[in-house]
Image (cartoon, grey):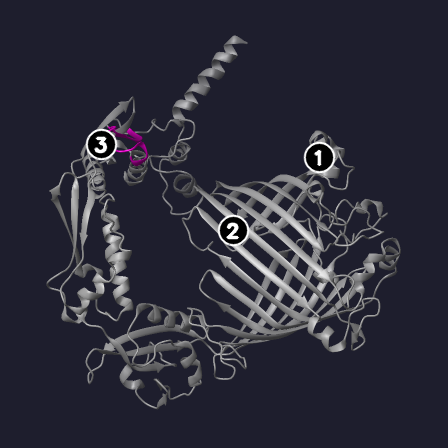
Amino acid sequence: MRFNTYILLFFSVTMLLNCSGTRHIPERDLLYIGHTIDIEKGEESKKTRKNIKAELDGLIRPKPNKSILGMRPSIIFYNIFPEVKKDSGFKYWVKYKLGKEPVLMSKVDLEYNRKVIQNYVENKGFFNAESKADSTRYGKKAKANYTVKLHNQYHIKSVVFPTDSMLLSKEINKLQEESFLKVGKPYDLDIIKNERARIDAHLKERGFYYFNENYLLVQVDSTVANHEVDLIVNIKNDIPEKAKIQYSINNIFVYPSFNLGRDTIATRKMDTLKYRDLAIIDNKTVFKPLIFEKTLLFKKGDLYNRTTHNLSLNRLITLGTFKFVKNEFKETDSVNNQLDVYYYLTPLPKKSIQVETLAKTNSANYSGTELNINWSNRNTFMGAELLKISAFAGLEVQISGLNKGFNVYRFGGEASLIWPRFISPFNMSSGSAYVPNTKASIGYEYQLRTQLYSLKTLNSSFGYIWKENERKEHNLNIVNIAYTSSNNVSDLYKEQIAVNPSLQRVIDRQFILGTTYSYAYTNTMIKNKTNNIYFRGAIDLSGNSTSLLLGANDSDNPKAILGVPFSQYSKLEFEFRHYYNFGNETTLASRFIVGAGMPYGNSDELPFIKQFFIGGTNSIRAFRARSIGPGTFNSAELTNTFLPDQSGDLKLEFSTELRAKIYKMVKGAVFLDAGNIWLLNEDADKPGAKFSGQFLDELAVGTGVGLRFDFNFLILRTDIAFPLRKPYLPKGDRWVLDDINFGSGTWRKENLIFNLAIGYPF
């Protein structure tokens, strides 16, 4: 027994030595395992030393091979195959994808890194700093050691801006109050560079088209006092005369059908159409002049500014009509200090057809596929209008859950027309980088739920979509109409209605005539940011104007349009998400949702399609879709129901999920979900469903783990979750932590929920 233990120990030690990565290191070289930076304590604060060390750590090159518990598996994979002749295949993948070449000490330039360190600390105001570089050997491994003495950091004593009478100097002098250079602050070269960029950006807004930040010189005088500097902002003497001049806009030329491979300016100076401040050169007369007046923000006589320059280009691009957008500014020959503006636009093909196949999942645990056919006309009425006609057909099945076996077949179509401007009796305009859109749409969908019923839905809307900037978007539907009716109701479904009468609402005819508005804010497109957020607020109003016209105020005797009682309600919903990025592709993502809907006047309840549901793959994953609530109501009391009507007027939901990269395209997650729905009024058929001050004690809570497989074109998500708290249990017994037993087949069958979905839950 002892002999076997020694043998096992011997092989374990041998493997560990091999995993250290030093086995194949050349005889006269060493494996580089990293560096240390020692910043000796001086008069500077501990926080300053810590921040400088963190910055310096990121500047040292090269980076060593990654180590896991002292082992370097990337080197092991690299050495498995000594020679790989092909640039593809399994051996290549192991050696160069899983493996990494050992980083050798001979590749480390100690003196270069020392100079990098010295340069950095001097740029931070430590002009008298000292730095040294050395190395330490550990057998076949070595580490670089850097030592820094910072001494005293220099601070800003005064800042002097140009004071001469030149127009350029006067404009720069106006910027003193908002300067990044503050008396008393430490000297920092990066802040000086940012100040030059700030001044240049301001001058570009004031007509100085040819100015460049390199024309500014910030002189540093370190002899004025002990560890202090004077900063003198100057304009270089040899800058071009054009850089000193303010320019205004003269003529504006637009080439709407310019061909980059065929046309030149000379060949296109024909058939010029004068339209207010624009000269439209287009012998094909492809676009109406109005579209360019609405899109381009420069007007004749305007002072040049970079913001209007960039906004106009962005607006042309976001029209969605042009493949290439090019812009030039040229000095006007006949008038001094003026620029002619040229826009060269290459249109996309006017008409296109697209066929796509989708894999999809929804919050009700249904997964399936869908075929879409989309036809587009990008310039329908010569005003860059986008006409889209689409048709779709799809199949959805529930892999696991109460509705397993009841497949859903869907087909339908939609026609929409988008105008790249506000269509309104009022004078509405937008000066953002995004052209505002007016959208009208009409659509039809037929949905067949096998063995149950079919639904026909006709919807139409007219409204506006506009973005203030890349972060803020508004969506206002002035008119939003939806009509739903059913047929082919099966005997099986009628039997379920007898058990649960509220299921009748699913197949009742519904008519919605109202207005919706939503606002969304996000900064999630900003990369390398520690905190990212997303917010969306929406309001849905229906039937209010109609109620005033028809005098509807009695839900027991509702007014009807074309024989169908119209719905009257108000609904609010807010969603907030926060993403805390730890780095190394690790993120803590959290979401909070609150919603409320109130029927009144012509209605005594919200339309079924407007009610709140909870549970499922994108909600509380430890519970099946629509299987929680309202409140403490227990749907299990409804015998054999396969489609529980667990919907509500109020919703509260919270989720948090820690996401981390495991390997290459695989990410893991640990999550916690909580929430519930409630009714505003008592329902005799649903005891415990009404909202009360005890709502926090009625939250469902679940947790679980999951994997996300990122295939670039889609993210496949698998989650396994189980409940921690069941709101429908008696008070005092709702926490079920003591019941958790992964070894019990009965417990697993009743509690473990597997979710298969596409995309992140939020």
- Residue ID at (23%, 27%): 135
Q: Nearer the viewer, mark 3 or mark 2?
A: 3
Secondary element under disc 1, as helix, strand or loop, is loop
Q: Which mark is residue 711?
A: 2
Amino acid type shown at disc 3 = Val
Answer with mark 3 or mark 2, whichever residue precedes in sequence. 3
Give the structural element (helix, strand or loop) at label 3: strand
Q: Which residue is mark 3?
A: 148
- In the rendering, at what x and y percent does residue 100 appear? 37, 38
User: Which of these two is toward me, 231 or 262?
Assistant: 231
Secondary structure at badge 2 equals loop
Residue 698: % across, % down: 72, 42
User: Which residue occupies the extreme top position in the image?
Assistant: 2
Amino acid type at circle 2 is Phe
The quadrant of the picture occupied by the N terminus is top right
> Is disc 1 in contact with disc 3, using a CB cutoff of under 8 Å?
no
Task: Give the label, 1 or 2, closer to the camera.
Answer: 1
**Tag 1 near tag 2, CB within 8 Å:** no
Write the residue at 21% across / 61% down.
173
Crowd rating for badge 2 (residues with CA inside 10 Å; few <14, some 14–19, many 20+): few
Q: Is residue 256 visible?
A: yes
Which residues are the magenta region?
Answer: 29-48
Lower sequence index among marks 1 and 2: 2
Q: Which residue is mark 1?
A: 735
Is residue 13 or residue 388 the one in the foreground?
A: 388
In reply to whether residue 399 is colored magenta, the answer given is no
